Amino acid sequence: MIPVLEQWQIFLALCGAGLLLAFGFDCYRVGRYFWRPKRLRTHMGDALFWLIFTALTFTLLMFINWGEVRAYVFLALGLGTILYAGFLSRGMRRRLYTGGRLLARMMAVGRRFLRQTVLVVIIPGSMVFSCLTFPFAALRLFLRRHHPGGPPGGVKG
């Protein structure tokens, strides 16, 4: 028999887990908004999301209360989700959308920077490198063919 105080601790921990699961769902929702997947990919993403979160919930239950599934487990997870949806979801989604837009802008700037770096630095640099290495390669080939001495590796015949 689990003491009442420990049951309350488990209940509060599972409420926190419900909050985290709801936050993860909001993150997934915002991610789908930005990526705009087609119907099949949406279904695949939904299935993958729920599989991952089911595994996380199972693992969490194993750590918190040794995997015992009782009515208060469902009540706590549901209460955490409802509290998040009622008080935190709108503000968090707003921040997630803002963060997603900021991330998209930063990725666009980074892409532009990389493209300009390739055009300005890497392409001319590789051309200069190939122009400089050609004479050395030719000299190495010449020296290899006209090297005085016996057969390679010291083999005596």
Image (spheres, rainbow, N blue to C red):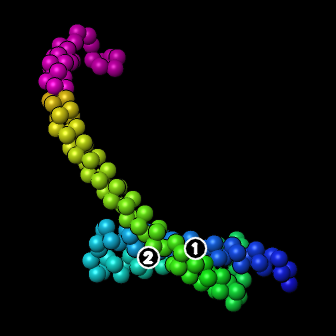
* Picture residue at 65% right of the left edge, 86% below the top: 75
Q: Is residue 128 above or below residue 49?
A: above
User: Please, what is the three-letter code of the amino acid marked with disc 1?
Assistant: Leu
Where residue 137 sits, quadrant-wise, is top left
Does label 2 or label 1 sit earlier along the sequence? 1
| Residue under pointer 1 | 19
Q: Farthest top residue?
A: 148
Quick one: 120 or 23, which is closer to the camera? Answer: 23
**Main SS, magenta residues:** helix
SS at badge 2: helix
Quick one: 77 or 119, which is closer to the camera? Answer: 77
Residue 47 visible in the shown view: yes
Residue 126 visible in the shown view: no
Residue 16 appears at what percent x and percent y?
63, 72
Whether 132 is among the magenta residues is yes
In the rendered view, does 5 fall on the left or right side of 38?
Answer: right
Q: CA distance from mark 2 to mark 1?
A: 20 Å
Where residue 80 sits, quadrant-wise, is bottom right
* Picture residue at 15% right of the left edge, 31% below the top: 124
The answer to whether the residues at label 2 and label 1 have Cβ atoms under 8 Å apart is no
In the rendered view, does 81 fall on the left or right side of 149?
Answer: right
For the magenta stretch, what is the residue range? Answer: 128-157
Mark number, residue 48 = 2
User: Please, what is the three-letter code of the amino acid marked with disc 2?
Assistant: Leu
